[in-house]
Image (cartoon, grey):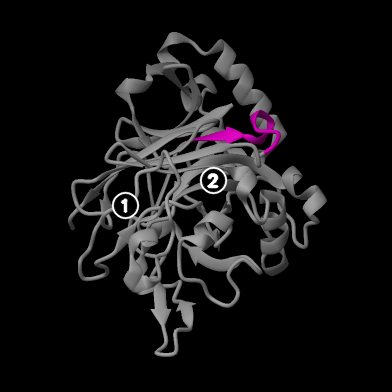
Amino acid sequence: MRFCRFVRDGAPRLGVLSGESVIDLLIAGNGADMFNSMTELIEAGAPALETAARLAGTASKDARFPLSSVNLKAPLVPSTVLCSGSNYRSHNAEKANTPLSGKEPEFFVKTSDCVIGPGENIMCDPVLTQKLDCEAELAVIIGRAGRHIAAADALDHVFGYTVANDVTARDRQVRQTAEGVTWYELGRGKAFDTSLPLGPAIVTADEIPDPQQLTLRCHVNGELRQHASTAEMIWTCAELVHFFSINFTLKPGMVILTGTPAGTAWSVDEELGGSWTHPPGLTPATRYCQPGDEIECEIVEIGILGNPIAAP
């Protein structure tokens, strides 16, 4: 199934995407508590999924709305977002790297304050950054709690997947010493208002049996900047679930970001160590993101997450 959140009568609602329609689960389920929020649905587990599937198949006309008529929001507002950087070899090849790049997952955190939904503005704040960059990524949504989860069991703890844009302030992230050593300041460079668009929907894990066989793309103003398979990750989704579960008890509704492939604006920024040669078919960036730009992050098997860049 494909779950979404949307606004109706001024309040967020939980829905199922069915073709070009959205089914309001609160109406279809006669106000059942499990459909009050995405987190409650995830926590309710298999019974909630079974009920949602039944309701989606029998929903009356008054519970169905044209997709074009609703305002989609981020499919969930996660309690915690655990992020892995430098997880595609192609991305590592296009940029300056730290001594640990590609040797272990880069570990940083975003918060719910970073999250926006489809169509909402990514703010380009010149006080924060002059080098705003975007990164299309696969996001993993945890469905079942666990700590020290074995990689072999990790996907059993996944509720589903969605599309993410890991918006980054490169001039806050990348630091270099006079001797040429590079390190990352991943606090201010990654976590700020509007730095995590999510959406358009969560596709449940049963529809994605192998998350390492998904196609990822990013267009900027219609130009194809990123195009890769999740098979190119250094650490798989299962390995990242294992990795993060060493630090945290993973809980329903937590999100894991899995990194981005080559094609970022960083790749053409020699000042910050950009060094990638773009392969045929991709359009190299000529600058970082600016107000007026349109960003589309896509995972073909999930959907397209579109957001404009705007001034504060």
Asked whether 249 falls inside the magenta stretch, the response is: no
Q: Tell me: 23 left or right of 230.
A: left
Q: In which quarter of the image is the N terminus?
A: top right
- The residue that label 2 is drawn on is 138
Which residue is drawn at the image coordinates 78% and 57% (left, top)?
149
Q: What's under tag 2, amino acid-wise?
A: Leu
The magenta segment is 201-210
Camera-nearest label, 1 or 2: 1
Q: What's under tag 1, amino acid-wise?
A: Ala
- The answer to whether residue 99 is above or below residue 267 is below
Q: Is mark 1 on a helix, strand or loop?
A: loop
Asked whether 205 falls inside the magenta stretch, the response is: yes
Q: Can residue 6 be spotted in the picture?
A: yes
Residue 99's image quarter?
Answer: bottom right
Q: Position of residue 4 (x, y in %)?
A: 47, 33
Which residue is drawn at the image coordinates 54% and 33% (left, top)?
35
- Considering every residue shown, the one lying at the far bottom of the view is 178
N-terminal of the two: label 1 or label 2?
Answer: 2
Q: Residue 41 carries which label?
A: none
- The residue that label 1 is drawn on is 285
- The answer to whether residue 163 is above or below residue 149 is above
Q: Is mark 2 on a helix, strand or loop?
A: strand
Work out how far the residue at label 1 is from the one at label 2, CA to CA, in angstroms. Answer: 21 Å
Q: Where is residue 23 in the image (x, y as percent from the top left)?
A: 47, 21
Asked whether 37 or 145 is in front, the reply is 145
Asked whether 80 or 203 is in front, the reply is 203
Q: Tell me: 51 left or right of 183.
A: right
Asked whether 90 or 242 is in front, the reply is 90
In the rendered picture of this protein, how many numbered marks are placed on residues?
2
Q: Are marks 1 and 2 in contact (CB under 8 Å)?
A: no
Q: Position of residue 13 (x, y in %)?
A: 42, 33
